[in-house]
């Protein structure tokens, strides 16, 4: 991988811009390594000793330098274009990168003042990572700017697309790890571009990060020929741009040029769509970033290659407290970033580096869309009493519970055009919610043929035959300040049990954390009808798991009545904004 390749041939960065980008990247890498390894001596003012190193090393280095690289270049693009952007880190174990970037742009210290921007704050920053009483090693709810929790892989692209539905100004930059790309949900997620309306929705910029290895094996997409990968991504409907190499200076120039080109394309697509001149579904641009696993880390450990290999996935130097060679290698690794050039005598990052950070809420770590409680507004909901079924005499009338609910949802949709959608795997009709199609269509950007029913470029019903896609879109939609409903057959909803579980855990984490100070995001309700006669339930994450969710006091599931008489009242429960 010695040859830098890509469509963009010019070099857009002058010497000052190149130096600033590289210094930010080196600083982020230094902060990331420090988080994984150090308890003390954060600026290496004295030689490293075993006492400076954590007794148990937990973390993931391999994906981190790539995440830092993309983040740095997005800062430049946001500044140049005044973008409204969020950063979705698919490689969830890249926690050190997201924390390092939030620390560099100032957000981390604003939210957690004890992590100050000086040497004592650096010591606390390093010590807390993956340490008792500290923070997790993955991208977690308390990580500023995150709407995609690490741990369970496969949902990053879904969250990114869910975030931009009905968000016309928002750009979601979504880094997809090549290990994550092997999961079923992620493989299907590429089709989300067929449900995006460039006239009314925002845009997603996927960055497929090929670093070649998982924890102990190569990744599939890194081991097929480039032309085959290109054809695969083009078949998904994307226009892929390849950025490959390992020499930092050349890679900075290529990444900057490529990012400029793809952002120009996104802006052109949106301008044409919003001006009514876009002909057909566009091929949205994306980037394939091919770098070394553990880029800039130790090249060889114990006589075996580390950088560029699976051995860099987690902690490349695992015996630092007991092996003097590992300790010396760690010190050499950290000093290779030249910390004396990055921090002043007080431990503060030099101003010329932090100046790369966008201003205020332009920072991806503090963008309001990544803290959806700041944007959530109450829904305008119809009075459920108007939808009751009159029963003059018992056992003399008949009605379908969900059909009655459909009438109430129809009017809820009509009153909330920009912040409420229904998500489900091709079951809105069969679940008897037909009435919603009196006021909306199914959103669909693929071909529409004569005879198709309720398909349109714009709509508030999202249907695709994948429970994972529907649930993931809804999570991204809700986490960025809107409301929705997931409807799915009782027999199939268990496919996404683990997604409900992770979402509920994230909600609990946000409820405990200061990031939730702006207010709670909406609930994630799910309608679970039966295929055969029997009880039906309207669920929220807490009830789905048979345990309370801290985000939702007093929440839970409701068993739907045998008639539709009380159903709209039940259906109303999970939908108000603040719960």
Image (spheres, rainbow, N blue to C red):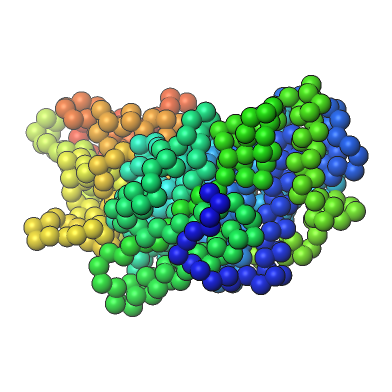
Q: Residue 167: horizontal and vertical position, in percent?
A: 43, 62
Is 401 placed above or below 460 here?
above
Q: Is residue 243 left or right of residue 325?
A: left
Residue at coordinates 33% horizontally, 28% vertically from top-left?
Answer: 494
In the depicted view, which residue is nearer to us: 462 or 281? 281
Q: Is residue 453 left or right of residue 97?
A: left
Q: Residue 217: horizontal and vertical position, in percent?
A: 48, 30
Q: Is residue 57 left or right of residue 90?
A: right
Q: Quadrant of residue 194?
A: bottom left
In the depicted view, which residue is nearer to us: 69 or 114? 69
In the depicted view, which residue is nearer to us: 333 or 349? 333
Is 13 placed above or below 436 here?
below
- Residue 383 shows in this picture: no
Q: Residue furthest top?
A: 322
In the depicted view, which residue is nearer to us: 501 or 48? 48
Q: Quadrant of residue 96?
A: top right
Is 247 placed above or below 182 here?
below
- Residue 298 shows in this picture: yes
Residue at coordinates 64% horizontally, 56% vertically from top-left?
Answer: 248
Residue at coordinates 12% horizontally, 60% vertically from top-left?
Answer: 449
Residue at coordinates 79% horizontally, 28% vertically from top-left?
Answer: 325
Q: Residue 221: horizontal and vertical position, in percent?
A: 41, 42
Q: Residue 44: horizontal and vertical position, in percent?
A: 86, 42
- Count the numbered circles shown: 0
Q: Is residue 24 left or right of residue 277?
A: right
């Amino acid at each position: 991988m010695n040859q830098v390749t890509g469509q963009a041939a010019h070099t857009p960065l002058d010497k000052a811009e190149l130096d600033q980008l590289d210094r930010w990247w080196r600083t982020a890498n230094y902060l990331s390594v420090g988080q994984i390894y150090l308890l003390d001596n954060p600026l290496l003012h004295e030689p490293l000793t075993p006492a400076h190193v954590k007794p148990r090393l937990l973390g993931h280095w391999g994906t981190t330098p790539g995440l830092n690289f993309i983040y740095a270049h997005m800062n430049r693009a946001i500044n140049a274009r005044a973008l409204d952007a969020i950063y979705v880190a698919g490689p969830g174990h890249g926690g050190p990168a997201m924390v390092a970037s939030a620390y560099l742009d100032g957000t981390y210290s604003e939210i957690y003042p004890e992590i100050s921007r000086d040497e004592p704050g650096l010591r606390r920053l390093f010590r807390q990572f993956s340490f008792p009483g500290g923070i997790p090693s993955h991208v977690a709810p308390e990580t500023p700017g995150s709407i995609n929790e690490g741990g369970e892989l496969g949902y990053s692209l879904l969250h990114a697309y869910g975030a931009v539905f009905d968000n016309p100004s928002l750009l979601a930059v979504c880094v997809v790890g090549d290990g994550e790309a092997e999961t079923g949900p992620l493989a299907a997620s590429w089709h989300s571009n067929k449900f995006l309306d460039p006239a009314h929705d925002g845009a997603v910029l996927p960055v497929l990060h090929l670093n070649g290895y998982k924890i102990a094996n190569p990744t599939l997409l890194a081991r097929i020929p480039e032309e085959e990968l290109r054809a695969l991504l083009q078949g998904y409907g994307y226009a892929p741009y390849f950025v490959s190499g390992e020499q930092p200076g050349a890679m900075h120039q290529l990444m900057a040029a490529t990012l400029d080109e793809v952002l120009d394309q996104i802006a052109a697509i949106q301008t044409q769509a919003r001006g009514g001149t876009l002909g057909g579904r566009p091929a949205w641009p994306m980037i394939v970033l091919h770098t070394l696993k553990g880029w800039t880390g130790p090249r060889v450990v114990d006589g075996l290659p580390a950088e560029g290999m699976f051995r860099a996935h987690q902690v490349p130097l695992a015996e630092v407290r007991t092996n003097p060679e590992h300790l010396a290698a760690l010190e050499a690794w950290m000093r290779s970033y030249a910390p004396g050039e990055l921090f002043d005598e007080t431990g503060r990052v030099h101003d010329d580096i932090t100046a790369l950070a966008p201003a205020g809420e332009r920072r991806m770590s503090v963008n309001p869309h990544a803290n959806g409680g700041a944007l959530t507004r109450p829904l305008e909901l119809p009075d459920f009493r108007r939808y009751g079924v009159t029963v003059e005499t018992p056992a003399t009338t008949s009605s379908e519970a969900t059909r009655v609910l459909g009438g109430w949802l129809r009017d809820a949709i009509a009153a909330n055009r920009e912040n409420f959608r229904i998500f489900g795997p091709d079951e809105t009709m069969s679940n008897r919610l037909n009435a919603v199609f009196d006021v909306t269509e199914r959103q669909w950007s693929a071909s529409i043929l004569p005879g198709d029913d309720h398909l349109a470029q714009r709509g508030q019903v999202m249907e695709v035959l994948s429970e994972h896609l529907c649930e993931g879109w809804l999570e991204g939609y809700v986490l960025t300040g809107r409301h929705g409903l997931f409807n799915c057959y009782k027999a199939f909803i268990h496919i996404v049990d683990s997604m409900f579980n992770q979402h509920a855990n994230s909600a609990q984490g946000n409820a405990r954390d200061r990031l939730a100070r702006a207010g709670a995001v909406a609930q994630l309700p799910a309608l679970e009808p039966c295929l055969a006669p029997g009880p039906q339930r309207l669920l929220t994450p807490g009830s789905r798991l048979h345990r309370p969710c801290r985000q939702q006091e007093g929440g839970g599931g409701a068993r739907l009545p045998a008639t539709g008489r009380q159903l709209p009242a039940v259906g109303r429960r999970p939908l108000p904004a603040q719960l």
